Amino acid sequence: ALKGEWGLVLANQAKEEQAVKKNDPSKLKSGPRTRFNDQEGRRVNADGTPRSENDIAIEARKTLRINSMCRFLLLENEKIAGFLVLTVIQCLGYPDVYTCRRCARICHRILETVSWNEQYTDLLGNKMFSIVVKAIVTEPKWMVGLEWDMINVLRDVYCRLVLGQTLLPGGQGPGLQQPRDPTNPALFEQSKSVDKPLQGGGVLCRSSDMPRVILSRLPSISVENIQTLDKGLTEKRAAKDQKDLLRELLLAAAEALKETEGGFSGNDSTFGSLFERAGTAESLLNQKAQRSAIVPDIPEKLVTYSMMQKHKEQENTDEQAAALGDIFKLS
């Protein structure tokens, strides 16, 4: 959640990692597509500005400060860490999209830094997870447009604390499954990047059941549903697949919760409150059901220019073949 020069340090670091990963040094000399590249072949920053000789040393110091500050706030001072994390968690329920989106990014950074620490298991697996689940299932109007961010936080918590899977920074990328400890199958092996939050962080070695218990308390969610979810998240580790599995589970809980509330879906004009449930057309959980009816099928066969050209070429080829056949008949 850094901006300005501090955010540029992390952007340059990501750019260098991409250049090494793709074995393409030219990426270090090219800026974003919206800017002209340096014509003299000099290295440029991620924003396209030229780099000076001292930038490497300056960025090294800034990176060290970023990591040291994060470690101090979350691991070295218990009082600061407790109040800070609780404040961020409570802000996830604040009815403002911008505030919640920024706090969701901070939550990812917290998970990357301390999810391996058992002292944080209750805060992350119980308080943070329950607030995010409540926000998604109750579908308040103020959260329209923020659902995928919240589901991504939900996925980050569940993968790290329950399944032993690490993610890329910001809860991105596929789940990287950590193997079981050969000496104790009840534990996961710790990730090699546990001390490097900017590279993904670690996992909770001893799996927690708190997220499973919270999901099982939702209406219409059984133990079998939780087991099916675990199996699906383990077999399909792509980000989109895992988020879709979580969304489908929460959709069933949201529909059951609507029935207990009397079927109100936020479409009644007498209820205009920001805290009322979003309507069916606004809800992300019902997105798939609506998608099939948005664009109707074309009533007649579609004929494009390329199809007409291919048809003409085929007719010319057939005429040439017929002409050659007539020559052989005459002979």
Image (spheres, rainbow, N blue to C red):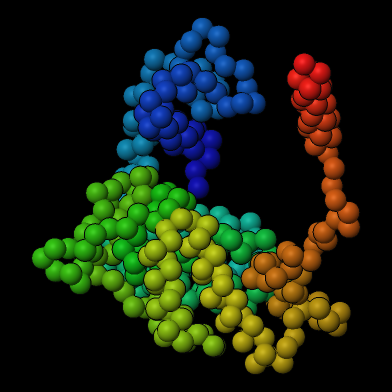
| Residue 267 percent coordinates (x, y) | 81, 78
Residue 156 in sight: no
Up the image or down, 240 lies above or below 233; here it is above
Task: Write down the quadrant of residue 329 in the picture.
Answer: top right
Q: Residue 232: x percent and y percent?
A: 43, 68
Q: Residue pushed farthest left?
A: 183
Tell whether 3 sits left or right of 79.
Answer: right
The residue drawn where x is 48% and y is 66% is 154
Foreground pick, 96 / 30: 30
- Residue 217 seen from this side: yes
- Looking at the rendered image, the quarter that the C terminus falls into is top right
* Residue farthest along the top direction in this orientation: 40
**Residue nearer the viewer, 83 or 294:** 294
217 over 208 or under it: above or below: below
Q: Position of residue 229 (x, y in %)?
A: 44, 73
Q: Residue at x 30, y 56 (%)?
A: 202
- At 37% from the left edge and 78% from the top edge, which residue is drawn? 210
Which of 128 and 218 lies nearest the eye of the viewer? 218
Count numbered badges in the picture: 0
Residue 131: x and y in percent read: 51, 74
The quarter of the picture where residue 178 lies is: bottom left
When the figure is inspected, residue 145 is found, relative to residue 229, above or below; the finding is above
On the picture, is 83 further left or further right than 38? left
Instruction: Please tell me which residue lies in front, 198 or 274.
Output: 198
Looking at the image, residue 263 lies above or below residue 98:
below
Residue appearing at x 74%, y 74% in the figure: 280
Where residue 237 sits, quadrant-wise, is bottom left
